[in-house]
Structure formats: structure tokens, C-alpha cells
Amino acid sequence: AEVQARQSFALLYLHIGTLIGVFLVPWLCTKLGRRKTMLLCFLGGPCSVLLVATLAKDFTSLLLLSPLMSLFGIGLSAAFVLYFPEIFPAKHRATGAGLSYNGGRIVAASFPFLTAFLIGSQGDVAKSIAQTSLFLALGAVALAFSPETKGLKLHGANET
């Protein structure tokens, strides 16, 4: 019963980070721009995982630090919802946004298996989680080749 209660509290705290992320990140997208906000999430994600993996020494510290992970991780998806439709012309918007968003989800589905493999081969949970979270930083590299769309008119917005 205690394990289930702790799992419920941990999930609650992750959801708090999610809620903050889905409201804060779109606001930041309008203030800072899409690319700067996504860069913050791409780099903040691995940093938050590393922070939790190294500093969460007990259940209370885990609860206090874990919302940062979902803030950056789920917050990033809130930026994608704004950004992906803006980079595709009207006739390709739904397909382009859908493929971009869900293609990333398909790739990300392998990460729990990769993390488990690393834990099994290295025997270090914190190090293995930190290593796989560094793949988020690759998104920062992709941003260097991505346009900023803040303030731009949506492609084909006047088309019927």
C-alpha cells in the first residue's frame, strides 16, 4: 500500500510539472520565440534528468525535483504544437505536422529499452538515465537548421 501511495504522489508531482510546462512553454514561445524556447527545453530536459538522478537522495527530494523533468519534456511538446503547423504550407500542414510529431514519438519509444540496456550493462541507473536523456540535446542541433516562425504569417492562411 505504501508503494502504491508513493507511486501516486510521484505521478501527481510529475503531472504538476506537466501542467506548468503546457502553460508556460507556449507563453515563452510568444515572448522569446519558438526556437529559443525549444532550445531551453532541449537543454533543460537532460539537465533536469541529471539533476534528479544525482540530487534526489530520498523520496521528498525526488518529489520536489521531478516536476522539472516533465516541465521540460512535456512542455517541449507544447512548443511543437505551435511550431510544426507554422513550418509547413497549408496543403502539407496536417501531414507534415503529424509526421514530425509522431515520428519523434516513434523514435522516443525505443528510449526506455535503451535505458534498460544501459542499466543492465553498466549497472548504474543514474548514469544510464543521464546518457539517454542527452539525446534530447540533439534537438538543439536540429534547431540550428530550423526557421524561427514567431510573428510570421501562417503559410497559406488566406487560401481556401
Image (tube, rainbow, N blue to C red):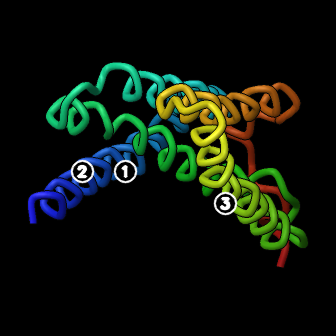
Identify the residue position indicated by label 2 in the image: 10
Q: Give how far apart the Cα atoms at labels 1 and 3 are.
A: 19 Å
Q: Is residue 108 above or below residue 37?
A: below
Of marks 1 and 3, the one in the foreground: 3
Task: Quarter of the image for the N terminus: give it.
Answer: bottom left
To which quarter of the image does residue 60 belong?
A: top left
Q: Is residue 144 above or below residue 133?
A: above
To which quarter of the image does residue 37 belong?
A: top right
Number of numbered discs overlaid on the protein picture:
3
To which quarter of the image does residue 127 belong?
A: top right
Could you tell me which secondary element the residue under label 2 belongs to?
helix
Front-most of residues 76 and 126: 126
Could you tell me which secondary element the residue under label 3 belongs to?
loop
* Residue in the picture at 53% in, 52% down: 78
Q: Earlier in the sequence, mark 1 or mark 3?
A: 1
Amino acid under label 3?
Ala
Identify the residue position indicated by label 1 in the image: 18
The reply to whether dot 1 and dot 3 touch (C-beta < 8 Å) is no
Q: Earlier in the sequence, mark 2 or mark 3?
A: 2
Could you tell me which secondary element the residue under label 1 belongs to?
helix
The reply to whether dot 2 and dot 3 touch (C-beta < 8 Å) is no
